[in-house]
Image (tube, rainbow, N blue to C red):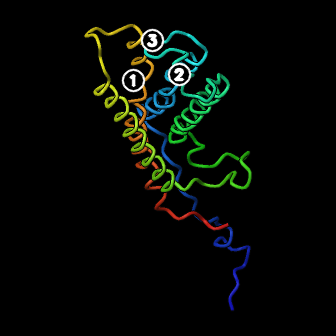
Amino acid sequence: MTTTDPATPEARVPPPARPPVPPPPRWAVRAAHVAAWSTVPSGVWRVALVLGVPVGVMGHEEFLDSFPDNSLLLALGYVLLLGAVAEVASYLTLGLVRPWGEVVPRWIPLLGGRRVDTGLAVLAASLGAFAVTVLWWVLFFGGLLVAESPDPGISAGEVLFVAAYAPLLLWGPLLAAVTWSYHRRTHSVRAVPEPRR
């Protein structure tokens, strides 16, 4: 049985560390921020609708009719929950260009300080990009194509509605582009095994 003398230089050399992940390109950072903000206008539009602000294509009473007992509280809860889910989901795009997309922040219980499984992050972001692209492109364009148009003109309410919902069309493609950038940056680092502790 051989032992290594702690005084020898070989014993004092730490194991090789993983190379750092290169910083994200400027275009990816900008794209991530646009994707994160893309859900805000539609959320504001929905809250305004519930609160009775005239937003054009649908009236306050017409919207409340779709809830039991025309409940303003249920409508507001639904709109706020929908907005919160969309905001959190779009905000996660920033993780692909921020350090917390590479190492879990220390304040998170049980996982804090651990490296993010970049393969899992790429898979989740890719599925998310596909889902929101299909969802919003189909809903938006599908809705426009089948919507009844009693007059050939476009009302101010329709313009406001399109302006509020059109940014959602950017969310999926931008998330896909930022995911591709994240994958390229982290792929070579993933190939280097993490040192044992």
> Which secondary structure lies at badge 3?
loop
Which residue is at 39% across, 23% downward? Answer: 166
Nearer to us: label 1 or label 3 = 3
164 shown above or below 78 = above
- The number of numbered badges drawn on the structure is 3
Mark 1 sits on what residue? 166
Q: Residue furthest front?
A: 69
Q: Crowding at label 3, few (<14), some or many (≥20) Cα neighbours within 10 Å?
A: some
Sequence order check: which comes first, mark 1 or mark 3?
3
Q: Which one is in front, 30 or 148?
A: 148
Looking at the rendered structure, the kind of residue marked 3 is Gly
Q: Which one is in front, 152 or 95?
A: 152
Mark 2 sits on what residue? 63
Q: Position of residue 81 (x, y in %)?
A: 61, 33
Q: CA distance from mark 2 to mark 1?
A: 21 Å
Mark 3 sits on what residue? 56
> Which secondary structure lies at badge 1?
loop
111 shown above or below 13 = above
